[in-house]
Image (cartoon, helix red, strand yellow):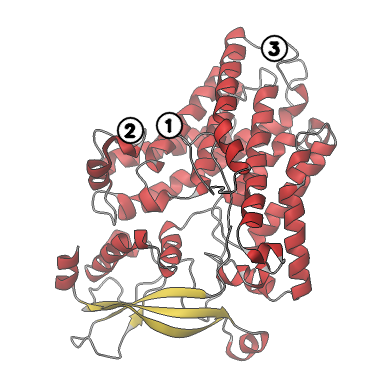
Amino acid sequence: MEWFGAGDYDAARFVLQRGIALLYLVAFVVVLRQFRPLLGEHGLLPVPRFLELAGGRAGPTLFRRRYSDRLLLAVAWAGVVLALSVVVGLPQSGPPWVPMLVFLAMYGLYLSIVNVGQVFYGFGWESLLLEAGFLAAFLGSDEVAPPVVVIFLFRWLVFRVEFGAGMIKMRGDVVWRDLTALYYHHETQPMPGPLSWFFHHLPRPLHKVEVAANHVTQLIVPWLLFAPQPVATFAAAVVVVTQGWLVLSGNFAWLNWLTMVLAFSAVSDDVLGRVLPRGDAAHAPTPVWFVVVVLAVGAFLVVLSWWPARNLVSKRQAMNASFNRWHLVGAYGAFGSITRRRSEVVVEGTEDDDPFTTDWHEYEFRGKPGSVDRWPRQYAPYHLRLDWGMWFLALGSPSQHRWFTMLLRRLLEADGPTLRLLAHDPFEGRRPRYVRARVFRYRYSTLDELRRKHRWWARQEEGLLVAPQDLASMRRLG
């Protein structure tokens, strides 16, 4: 069945399987380190309460009948083991059904987590990782040639990520059309990285060139992914380079990293085979059962593609939308609008019995701006979910208020798991008497301010979000 296999994409399969598995590994590690204080039995948004209220609307999940933190740990550790096995290449060395089962298991385990993750898992890259893992299940093993159907479905996925992002920008904020978006983006993005300050201070004419190049990359280049070689490889290289540029300029969890991995579906062995394993040139005959399964899955995904394809041409294009509970063949995109100024919620506590004291100490979060003299760190592809929630909170998102109230209560209780989500507890495990939350406007420091004061940020108070609260008052609220 020579028509079925893409024999010149063995190296691409090598990158796809291991790269996707590596990002699943990161995702499951994030679950182990953050899920319980955020969403566990005693979390900020407890899953048992969510399931009680949502019922069948929660979507497919292993936690439907019963959630426990112990079961969550079992699911996450199983995901870690499965992902590691693919990274080192164990399932790929067997028959095609072995990596198929492993990837489907990882997909099912992570789907169970995402569908109960509420606002902390409400990101487009969760669906992107799920869809990528599902597709990877049908790439086969080293015994057989990579199915050409799956290779092109991966390209269709990259196309939706890039072209969807390009269209949402053109239909959205005027700053994308007049090429001024990067006057603001690096300063106001959710979680700046260590180089974001430098990107922000590039000359404004260069910022306009960057935006124009972004439009070319997202609106024109994705079509070339379906062209014959070497054009498709060239298009993939452009995607990888531009996504790498985004990795350098900010922290967007695994969105950019995964997009780079997926782009390798358009790179032929003539390029990748020089540095990566090309597999056995004489593949074993593809089993009939595998052909039937792949063609059936391919037909199913083509049918599901109607909704995202229609969304791409819609004047009311949805961004990061799932059209089914399985998070398959979704719509993607990012930053359809750009905020012009940065607000940050700063949480403080005091051990003083007087709520009107001036002796307040700031809690430091790991990734979001806090202390003005702290240089932002690189965290991506690791995902700091609490920090992202704090960014949305500062935008005034009502969906964030419930968990934030519970966060303040946990700080008053000096809850250990919650405090471990932070970079610094000013009370070193002791209970504060009061907590409060203030809103500040942040801007990057100028070069002169950085030289003289060694500060990356300048900030000015805008107002009080939560007045001083003690534990008794927070218990009444929550």
Q: Is residue 117 above or below residue 380?
A: above
Can you identify the residue that label 1 sits on?
A: 108
User: Of marks 2 and 1, which one's residue comes earlier in the chain?
Assistant: 2
At 71% from the left edge and 66% from the top edge, which residue is drawn?
A: 178
Q: Quadrant where the C terminus lies?
A: bottom left
Q: Which residue is mark 2?
A: 62
Q: Kindly indicate whether the residue at mark 1 contacts the one at mark 2 (C-beta within 8 angstroms).
A: yes
Residue 90 left/right relative to 433 = right
The residue shown at (53%, 21%) is: 98
- In the image, residue 230 lies at what x, y percent? 85, 36
- Front-most of residues 407 and 18: 407
**What amino acid is at disc 2?**
Leu
Quadrant containing the N terminus is top right
Q: Is residue 95 in view?
A: no
Q: Helix, strand, or loop for circle 3?
A: loop
Determine the CA span between mark 2 and mark 1: 8 Å
Q: Determine whether, in the image, residue 416 is placed left or right of residue 9.
A: left
Determine which of the numbered discs, if any, sits on residue 284 in the image: 3
**Disc 1 vs disc 3: which is toward the camera?**
1
Cα gap from disc 2 to disc 3, whole angstroms: 37 Å
Residue 339 percent location from the top left of the image: 55, 69
Instruction: Give neighbour class at mark 3: few <14, some 14-19, many 20+ (Cα, 10 Å).
Output: few
Residue 408: percent from left, percent from top: 28, 68
- Marks 1 and 3 sit apart, C-alpha to C-alpha, by 29 Å
Horizontal relation, residue 101 to residue 357: left or right? right
* Identity of the residue drawn at 62% across and 22% down: 141
Circle 3: residue type: Ala
Q: Mark 2 near mark 3, Cβ–Cβ under 8 Å?
A: no
In the rendered structure, which disc, 1 or 3, sits on the residue that comes first in sequence?
Answer: 1
For the residue pair 13 and 52, the one nearer the viewer reads as 52
